[in-house]
């Protein structure tokens, strides 16, 4: 790592710390039942997302989506301070240390923990691809950031809508095929963009379809890990004896 890259990372660290000081109420309200400290975050941008009300959306889909999209938006707003040079902005997006810095913040905010290293790396990859496309597709400005939030809202909603369809399938192979069903994903995008009053370019639709597919496959993969883990715990659990067991 050269000195220029090192200084860039240090600047991002300093910026994130200052941002946290400015927008965090560290009200360490002690909860005896959970023994955790509570932090109240005040976001520098206004991004509201209400999870899909119909159907039982899994906690993994909700929390991973919240962490991933909040991180994407947070980085986008930080990039506003670096001008509009696309080459320089793309270089910053591809710096994994910078993405990790913001990702950790929202892991803490939403009390989310990645199930394994692969899941975290997949999330980072989607964030980079999402931001990479946004930077290439337009000129970074505050107005453009607000527009990007609308794109991200649509993508997160498609993640949730499609997750319900995946859950309805019976076998792993059927679920996997639904995750890869590009036509179904596009249908939801078309409906939602009309409802939000915006139009996504063909290139953006393709990019969104790809990241939605990856998100769904990632959640499906981790759900199988959870199932296997629960099964092994059950198999390895000591037999419970009572006075009636001889």
Image (cartoon, rainbow, N blue to C red):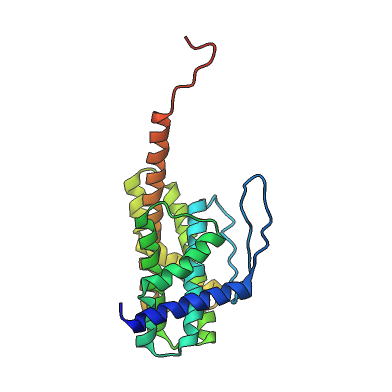
Nearest the viewer among 132 and 12 is 12
Q: Is residue 158 above or below residue 16?
A: above
Q: What is the tally of numbered marks visible in this picture?
A: 0
In terms of depth relative to the viewer, which is nearer, 199 or 108? Answer: 108
Residue ranking furthest to the front: 3
For the N terminus, which image quadrant? bottom left
Q: Which residue corresponds to the image point at 56% horizontal and 62% vertical from the top-left?
A: 109
Q: Residue at x 34, y 52 (%)?
A: 176
Is residue 32 something one can see in this rendering?
yes
| Residue 20: x %, y % from top left | 58, 72
Residue located farthest toward the top when viewing the structure as drawn: 246
Q: Is residue 135 above or below residue 39?
A: below
Residue 172: percent from left, percent from top: 34, 46
Please tell me which residue is depicted at 51% across the width and 66% down the height of the picture.
105
Q: Residue 202: where, in percent of width, then height? A: 37, 78
Where 78 falls versus 177 (above or below)? Answer: below
Query: How far across and how far down the image is residue 57, in percent?
Result: 52, 52
């Amino acid at each position: 790592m050269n000195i220029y890259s090192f200084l860039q990372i240090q600047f991002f660290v300093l910026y994130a710390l200052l941002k946290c000081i400015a927008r965090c109420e560290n009200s360490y309200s002690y909860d005896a039942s959970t023994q955790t400290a509570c932090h109240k975050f005040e976001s520098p941008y206004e991004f509201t997302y209400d999870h899909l009300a119909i159907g039982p959306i899994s906690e993994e889909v909700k929390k991973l989506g919240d962490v991933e999209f909040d991180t994407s938006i947070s980085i986008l707003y930080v990039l506003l301070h670096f001008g509009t040079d696309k080459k320089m902005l793309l270089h910053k997006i591809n710096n994994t240390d910078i993405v990790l810095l913001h990702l950790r913040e929202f892991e803490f905010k939403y009390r989310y923990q990645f199930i394994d290293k692969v899941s975290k790396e997949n999330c980072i990859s989607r964030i980079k691809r999402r931001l990479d496309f946004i930077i290439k597709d337009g000129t970074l400005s505050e107005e453009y950031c607000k527009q990007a939030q609308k794109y991200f809202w649509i993508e997160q909603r498609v993640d949730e809508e499609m997750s319900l369809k995946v859950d309805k399938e019976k076998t792993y192979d059927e679920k996997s095929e639904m995750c890869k069903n590009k036509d179904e994903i596009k249908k939801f995008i078309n409906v939602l963009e009309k409802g939000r009053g915006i139009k996504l370019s063909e290139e953006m639709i393709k990019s969104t379809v790809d990241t939605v597919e990856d998100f769904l496959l990632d959640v499906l993969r981790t759900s199988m890990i959870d199932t296997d883990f629960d099964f092994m715990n059950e198999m390895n659990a000591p037999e419970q004896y009572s006075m009636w067991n001889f």
